[in-house]
Image (spheres, grey):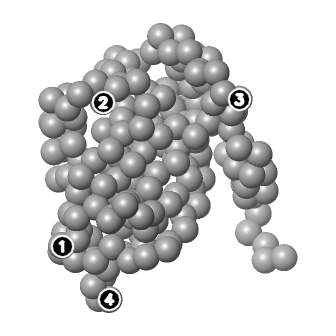
Amino acid sequence: MHALFRLLIVLATARKRPKISMFDTSSMSMRALLTDIDIAGHINNGMYFSLFDLGRFDLMVRAGVWDIMKKNKWSPLVQSETITFRKSVVFNQKFTQETRILGMDDKCIYFEQRMVANGEIYVQAVMATRLLSKNGPVGNEEILAKAGLTVPDGLELPEWVARWREDTALPGARRPAPHLWV
């Protein structure tokens, strides 16, 4: 985790913030720090993903899912992600990070995350995530059951996200993935 100190702060303060459902939108106020920016004076493109990690942790802690994950010794992991940049978040600029579950399929939970400043979307990303146990991936049905969650009516994975995931997926870890430029 690139932003380890910030993660520790999020984990310590998220419990003091209002509780939300895992299917609500989490919003965190942030500021672009010196450690976030590159030589151009804006948040580095790779740093956005580390900052988005913080938003997902905030959502999981505030929804009570983090405790269930720890109890079951599940680890979160990102399998795939895509990001679109619209405007630069510059040094010392205040912004909010918005995080919500976009949908689910049989394997992944998909998050949409945004950096918002002055009421406008600056950056938007979509992540396909899984939870892992010592025995391998944890199924979404098990996650929902142990967390006591029901997927809200109308929460359907957008078709473009399902296509994106299918079109960009690599073979599973137990299948070969030879390095050949085609």
Disc 2 packing (10 Å; few <14; some 14–19; many ≥20)? many
Q: Which residue is mark 4?
A: 40
Disc 1 packing (10 Å; few <14; some 14–19; many ≥20)? some
Disc 3 to disc 4: CB gap under 8 Å: no
Identified by mark 1, the residue type is Asn
**Of residues 47 and 4, which is closer to you in this image?**
47
Residue 67's quadrant in the figure? top left
Residue 129's quadrant in the figure? top right
141 sits left or right of 169 in the view: left
Tell me the number on the disc at residue 61.
Answer: 2
- The x and y percentages for residue 143 are 53, 20
Tell me the CA gap for discs 3 and 2: 23 Å
Residue 88 in view: yes
Where the N terminus falls, by quadrant?
Answer: bottom left
Task: Tell me the SS state at disc 1.
Answer: loop
Q: Which residue is mark 3?
A: 106
Q: Residue at x 54, y 11 (%)?
A: 145
Tell me the CA gap for discs 3 and 1: 41 Å
Disc 2 to disc 4: CB gap under 8 Å: no
- The x and y percentages for residue 149 are 50, 15
Residue 176 in view: no
